[in-house]
Amino acid sequence: MKHLICLVLLLTFTCGQAAEQILITETSVGKITKKTKPEIEELSKLYPTMKFKKELYVIEGDYRLDAIIAYYEGKKILMLLLDAGKTVAVTIYGNMFKTSNGNTIGDNFGIIYKNKYDCVHGHERYFDKIICDAPIMKNANYTFSSTKWKGQDGEMPPKKILEEMKLEEIEVVWEDNP
């Protein structure tokens, strides 16, 4: 019976070990790159343990983009934003992903940013979050949140709360800049 369970879990886990995290770089999120066809069938071949669903995503006001959402064990873990049939950004929500410097969803702000950081208070749907340039990756940003802080009129949270804020999203932008 143990061997059967290990066989069933082989795609996601190796027997007795947690699955290896999927690497996020400036040019890829695991097997997904800017050149990967943003089609459910193609993505399902790359990651057969994930379920993909196409949705309409509202950015701000009436601006809408197509999106492909990836779910794993019923949880939203990844979103590809599409424009004119091409992937322009990927947002990561699941801790099965890690950046090249080891950051993953759930990490504390104070662990990631020891001294220097470039962050702003979010607005609109991010009013209670802090958005920062990602360390090392030039085309990515990190979104942090906290249950102890709800965002007051564009102000940054106190240092103690900021250091304890959790990494909630990693966004990698692949849109060409003019």
Image (cartoon, rainbow, N blue to C red):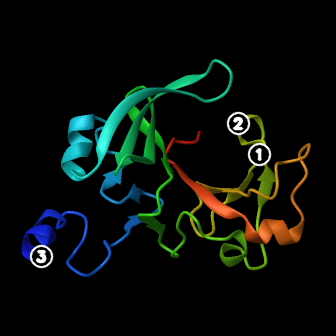
Q: Position of residue 163 (x, y in %)?
A: 77, 71
Q: Position of residue 22 (x, y in %)?
A: 37, 65
Q: Which residue is mark 1?
A: 122
Q: Are marks 3 and 2 in contact (CB under 8 Å)?
A: no
Dot 1 crowding, Cα within 10 Å, few <14, some 14–19, many 20+: many
Comparing 100 with 40, the one in front is: 40
Q: In this rendering, which labeled residue sits more in front, label 3 or label 2?
A: 3
- According to the image, label 3 marks what residue? 2
For the residues labelled 1 and 3, the Cα–Cα distance comes to 48 Å
Q: Nearer the viewer, mark 1 or mark 3?
A: 3
Q: Is residue 141 left or right of residue 163?
A: left
Q: Viewer-proximal residue, 133 or 159?
A: 159
Residue tagged by mark 2?
Answer: 125
| Numbered circle sitting on residue 65 | none
**Amino acid type, callout 1:** Gly
Labels in figure, total: 3
- Is residue 165 rendered to the left or right of residue 161? left
How far is disc 2 from disc 1 in space, using C-alphas?
A: 8 Å
Query: In the rendering, at what x and y percent does residue 178 appear?
Result: 59, 39
Secondary element type, mark 2: helix
Q: Nearer the viewer, mark 2 or mark 1?
A: 2
Residues under numbered marks 2 and 1 in contact, where contact means CB atoms less than 8 Å apart: yes
Residue 114, by quadrant, is: bottom right
Q: Residues within 10 Å of mark 2 (few under 14, many from 20)?
A: few
Residue drawn at (91%, 51%) of the image: 155
Q: Is residue 16 above or below residue 83?
A: below
**Amino acid of disc 2:** Arg
Q: Amino acid at mark 3?
A: Lys
